[in-house]
Image (cartoon, rainbow, N blue to C red):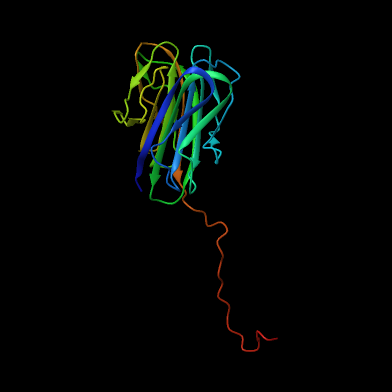
Amino acid sequence: MAWVHVQGTGADINVANATFAATFASTPTAGNIVIAAFYSGSIASGGTITCSDGTNTYTPSASTPFTAGVGIGTFGLFYLKAPSGAGKTITGTWNTTATGCIYIDEFSNTGSGIVYDKDNSGTFTNTGTTFNGLTLTPTVTGELLYALGGTDLGSLTAPTSGGTLGIWTGAAFGPETHGADAEYVLGASTGSQAVNFTDSSSGDSSAGMIIAFKLFAGDDTYAPTFVSLPFDPTISVWQ
């Protein structure tokens, strides 16, 4: 079954604030997966964050929050399988005031229910201007991948909104003013998958997060077992 990017947007937070918020053009469709990604270069340590749409609490990925330290900052990835009436405005609330950005993107798939697979995070040094030191190995083929990255000195310039770089497509909000960028893959192959951004400067220290979603394959562990027994005319259900 094919993944589809439904809608997305984001916001730059240029004045220090404890809340980072962005609003979709339309209410997310029930059953779709909504991803919210947060980055702050001004939080070097100790940052925590929660996320909600005012009614529903978003689930943090296993590595959220991920702090990359002085010069790079702190990252967070959250998700929600949208219920009926999910909110259009998604808000992240930090435990301190900060500057940075928020990305929000909605995805659909006509297959069986969408579930979280895994995430990964890390810091590394870019090879030239190529930001590809962060990887994730999906559990099954065809997963949705979503990645967020940032660097210490330069700015991530590609992929742009809707543009492609290798297997990756730029998130709707595109590269933002604090140097971060987000991207996704609509159906990744198995094996190790590396993020792919372009940095404005060479050899930067960089960091980021990546998250993966798969379709629920089902489990017959508790399925009933029917056994055919021989007919015995001496036994009555009325006995």
Question: Could you tell me which residue is drawn at 35 percent across and 42 percent down?
Answer: 4
Q: Determine whether, in the image, residue 52 is placed left or right of residue 110.
A: right
The location of residue 231, given as percent across then percent down, is 58, 84
Q: Foreground: 34 or 99?
A: 99
Determine whether 77 is above or below 108 in the image.
above
Query: Can the viewer see residue 188 in this picture?
Result: no
Determine whether 142 is above or below 223 in the image.
above
The location of residue 76, given as percent across then percent down, is 51, 27
Q: Foreground: 155 or 84?
A: 84
Q: Foreground: 226 or 106?
A: 106
The location of residue 181, given as percent across then percent down, is 39, 23
Residue 194 position by quadrant? top left
Looking at the rendered image, the quarter that the C terminus falls into is bottom right
Q: Determine whether, in the image, residue 24 is placed left or right of residue 167.
A: right
Query: Can the viewer see residue 215 in this picture?
Result: yes
Q: Foreground: 32 or 221?
A: 32
Question: Could you tell me which residue is drawn at 47 percent across and 33 percent down?
Answer: 36
Count of numbered circles in the view: 0
Residue 177 position by quadrant? top left
Q: Residue furthest bottom?
A: 234
The location of residue 58, given as percent across then percent down, is 54, 37
Q: Residue furthest right?
A: 239
